[in-house]
Amino acid sequence: MTDIDRRSFLAQSAGFAAGMALIPGLSAAMGRFSAPMKVGVVGCGRQGRAIVAELASFDNVTLAAICDIEPRRLNAGQRRAPDAKGYGSHREMLDAGGLDAVFVATPTHLHRAVVEDTLAAGVNVYCEAPLAHTPEDAKAIAAAARSSGKVVQAGFLARANPVYQLARTFFVSDAVRTLAAMEATRARKTSWRTPARDAETEKLLNWRLNPEVSTGLAGEWGSHQFDVFHWYTDSYPTRVTGFGSVRLHEDGRTVDDTISSTLQFPSGAALTYNATLGNSYEGMHEVFRGENAAIKLAWSHGWMFKEADAPTQGWEVYANRQQFHNDEGITLIAGATKLAEQGKLKEGVGLPHTPLWYGVESFLKAVSEGAPVACTADEAARSTIVGIRAHEAITAGRTVEIDPTELG
C-alpha cells in the first residue's frame, strides 16, 4: 500500500471506528428494490434450497421457476417455493422465458453448461462457487461472462460480507502493516455423503466423492477461503504443497476427508490451510498476522488483536472488546462510533443476516440498479483454479506450480 493510500484511508476513517455504516435495522431496508424481478433457481440441493429461503426476504423479487434433474430434489424445492413452476431441465426453464436472473446451484462440474445457456438466453446469472471442476471450464465461464453484456456474479461470499469489507479497510491500513503469515481452517463433522436409492442416483448426489469430478476439500471449501486472501492481498499463490488422507469416513471413498496445505505467495508470505470432515472445532475462519495486529475473520464476526507496541490510531476508544484466553480482541463493528454514542455498541457485533443473504442481495442490486457485482467471474475463475491446483498437490503429494498466466 502506498503512503497516499494510507493517508487517504486514515483521513476517511479518522474519528470513527469503522469504514462503513451498518446499523442494526438498516439491512432490512436493503432488501427492497424499485423494479420487480422474476428469478429462477437451477439446482434444488442444499445450496439451492438455501438460496430459495433467502430470496423470500426480498421485496419485489418473485421466484418464478425452479429446476432440478433429480425428481425428489425438485419436489423438495417446490415444497419450499409452491408458487414457482418446476422444470426437469434448465433448457426447458429458459425456453419458457420471462426471467430476469437465474441462480445456478448445481453440482460444480455442471455449472458451465447452465451458465453458458443462461447467458445465451440473455439472462443475468449468479453462479455458485467454485465456478467449475477444471481450469478450462472456469476460464470458459469467465469468457462467456465478459462477452455476454449481462450481470454475472459468483458465490464467493466474503466480498459481499460487511464484516469482511470492514476488516479489509483495516488490513490495507497501518492497523496491520507488514504481513507475516496467513492461516485458514474449515472444520465440520459431516460425511459429504447423501443416501441414495440406486447406483445412478448415488453417483448423481454424491459427486463430491467422485474423484472424476470432485475438487475435494481444497477446491469445494478451500477456494472460498483462498479468495479472501486473494482479495485482501491483491495477489495469488505461485506454488502449493499439501497432503491428505481419509481419517474418519472409511466407507470406500478415495477423496480425502482431511487435508493440510501450504500456499506460497510472491511476497514470501505463506498461507497454511487445514480442512476436515472429521471434527468441528474452530469451524471456519481466516487469520492475517501482521506487524501491528492480527485479524481473525469468522464469516459472521471479525476481531483485531493489536500488538503491544502498535501505535494508537484513536478509534480504539470506541471499541468493543472480547477476551480470548490471554488475548483481547477488538470486535470489528461497522458504524461503531454511532452505536457507541447510542450505548448500543454490543448490539452491532455480528451480522443480522447470513453471508449468503448479502451475496444474493448484492447480485440483485447489480441486476436492478446497475451496482458493481461483489465477485466477478474473472476473480472467481482465479480462486477456482487455485483451489483446483491445491487439490492436485494434495492428491499427488507433491508441489504444484501455479502459472500466473493461467490466472490471467
Image (spheres, rainbow, N blue to C red):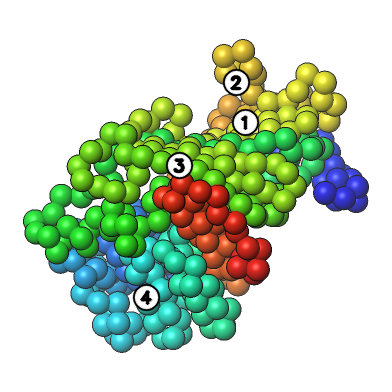
Quote the CA–CA distance across marks 3 and 1: 30 Å
Q: Secondary structure at mark 3?
A: strand
Task: Check residue 322 in the rendering and tell me which mark sits there, or answer none.
Answer: 2
Task: Say which residue label 1 marks.
Answer: 303
Q: Quadrant of residue 307?
A: top right
Which residue is disc 3 drawn over? 243
Q: Residues within 10 Å of mark 3 (few under 14, many from 20)?
A: many
Q: Residue at x 22, y 62 (%)?
A: 204
**Secondary structure of the residue carrying numbered label 4:** helix
Mark in the foreground, 4 or 2 = 4
Image point 29% across, 48% down: which residue?
254
**Closer to the camera: disc 2 or disc 3?**
3
- Three-letter amino acid code at disc 4? Val
Establish if 106 lies above or below 166. Answer: below
What residue type is disc 3 on? Answer: Phe
| N-term mark: 3 or 4 | 4
Residue 114 numbered tag: 4
The answer to whether one can see residue 23 in this image is no
Residue 206 percent across, percent down from the top left: 24, 55
Query: Is residue 84 rendered to the left or right of residue 263?
Result: left
Quadrant of residue 11 within the rendered picture = top right
Asked whether, in this view, residue 274 is left or right of residue 46, the answer is right
Amino acid bearing label 2: Gln
Q: Earlier in the sequence, mark 3 or mark 1?
A: 3
Q: Residue furthest top?
A: 326
Closer to us: mark 3 or mark 4? Answer: 3
Judge depth for marks 3 and 1 and give the one in front: 3
* Crowding near the residue tagged with mark 2, few <14, some 14–19, many ≥20 C-alpha atoms within 10 Å: some
Give percent across and percent down for residue 280: 37, 31
